[in-house]
Image (cartoon, grey):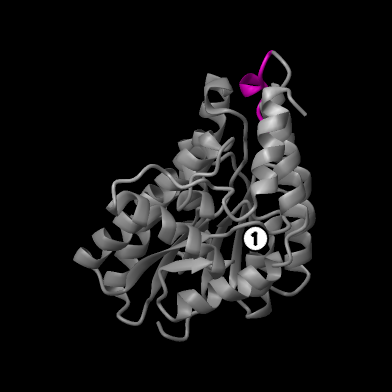
């Protein structure tokens, strides 16, 4: 029904973009389904959103476990019916020289960043399509959080880059697949650059069985420091991103960028491919950073 209250499903809802999606949705009177792996933070966030008068369903979910995503979908269906907007937003970060990343690093990052999105798409898309068939005025959108790391390939971010490139590819394909079967359900991909969120500290929620037996390597320490500095100094805020994402959904915009000016680097990458030339130096515009990283990693500083 056109007058139905929208229902939003958000993973990674206890902080960062996810919490801002919940706040903005609540301010509009939407039903909010909040999922997060961090129970304490989820309890606080859900209480905040419920205090606005919004109808809230909060559930602890490890998105790398498909049965937990399936349970979230079932609980959503039982409480509110098929959702209107689904934000597959939960994500974690990991850095370092790609050959130094452990198999546990790969399992953790791909499990959350990629498979969490896959499970969300599989669980919620059929529900949304089914509702679309019975309600001509229904409009649904699945928003998958990728990153500029899904467009570019910065060094010392290999595992993260791979996970986010896969999310961009998955979402582009999802968009095209949905166009084949429905005019009422679509998809968008969010590709933020450096925005002040808790992504740099995501290791706080790393499962015990996926923690490394040995401490971080030099490259991992350097990558962590660089990421923390970049994220904390970001001038674009999570609330600004939430506003931008909602506006994009409402205007049927697929690609959502926090820093459109960074697309110049994406253009350079595409030109490298089209001209069959070697990848351009990622530090061409900031050679001081490249010099510093080489000195640290080669032990010559």
The answer to which quarter of the image holds residue 253 is bottom left
**Tally of numbered discs:** 1
* Residue 243 location (% of width, % of height): 62, 75
Residue behind mark 1: 17
Q: Is-magenta flag for residue 239?
A: no
Taking the spot 61% from the left edge, 23% from the top edge, the residue there is 210
User: Is any part of residue 147 visible from this angle?
Assistant: no
Residue 157 in picture, x, y percent from top left: 57, 38
The residue sitting at 73% across, 18% down in the picture is: 215
| Residue 65, position as x, y percentages in the image | 51, 35
**Magenta-tinted stretch:** 206-213
Lateral position of residue 277 relative to residue 182, left or right = right
Q: Residue at x 71, y 31 (%)?
A: 295
Magenta part, dominant SS:
loop
Outermost residue on the left side: it is 180
Q: Nearer the viewer, residue 233 or 188?
A: 233
Direction top: furthest residue: 213
Q: Dividing the image into 4 quarters, which one contains the N terminus? A: bottom left
* Relative vertical location of residue 242 with respect to residue 27 in this rendering, above or below: above
Instruction: Tell me where residue 236 sits by quadrant.
Output: bottom right
Looking at the image, residue 245 sits to the left or right of residue 81; the answer is: right
Crowd band around label 1 with a 10 angstrom C-alpha radius: few (<14), some (14–19), many (20+): many
Disc 1, SS: helix
Camera-nearest residue between 116 and 3: 116
Along the viewing direction, whichever of 143 and 218 lies nearer the viewer? 218
Q: Is residue 96 visible?
A: yes
Viewer-side residue, 278 vs 7: 278
Q: Relative to 40, is 113 on the left or the right? A: left
Tell me if residue 186 comes above or below residue 155 in the rendering: below
Which quarter of the image is occupied by the C terminus?
top right
């Amino acid at each position: 029904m056109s007058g139905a209250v929208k229902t939003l499903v958000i993973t990674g809802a206890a902080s960062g973009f996810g919490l801002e999606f919940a706040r903005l949705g609540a301010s509009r009177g939407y039903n909010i389904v909040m999922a997060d792996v961090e129970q304490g933070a989820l309890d606080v966030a859900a209480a905040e959103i419920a205090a606005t008068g919004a109808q809230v369903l909060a559930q602890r979910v490890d998105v790398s476990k498909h049965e937990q995503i399936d349970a979230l979908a079932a609980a959503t269906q039982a409480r509110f019916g098929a959702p209107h907007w689904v934000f597959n937003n939960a994500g974690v970060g990991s850095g370092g020289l790609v050959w130094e990343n452990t198999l546990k690093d790969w399992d953790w990052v791909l499990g959350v960043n990629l498979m969490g999105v896959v499970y969300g798409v599989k669980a919620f898309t059929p529900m949304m399509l089914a509702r679309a068939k019975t309600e001509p005025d229904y409009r649904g959108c699945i928003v998958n959080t990728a990153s500029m790391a899904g467009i570019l390939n910065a060094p010392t971010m290999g595992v993260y880059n791979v996970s986010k490139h896969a999310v961009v590819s998955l979402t582009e394909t999802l968009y095209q697949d949905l166009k084949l079967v429905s005019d009422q359900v679509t998809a968008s991909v969010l590709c933020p650059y450096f925005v002040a969120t808790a992504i740099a500290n995501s290791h706080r929620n790393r499962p015990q069985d996926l923690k490394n037996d040995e401490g971080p390597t030099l490259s991992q320490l350097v990558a962590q420091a660089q990421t923390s500095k970049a994220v904390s100094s970001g001038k674009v805020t999570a609330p600004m991103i939430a506003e931008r994402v909602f506006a994009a959904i409402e205007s049927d915009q697929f690609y959502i960028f926090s820093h459109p000016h960074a697309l110049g680097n994406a253009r350079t990458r595409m030109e490298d491919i089209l001209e069959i030339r070697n990848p351009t130096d990622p530090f061409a515009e900031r050679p001081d950073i490249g010099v510093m990283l080489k000195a640290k990693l080669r032990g010559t500083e």
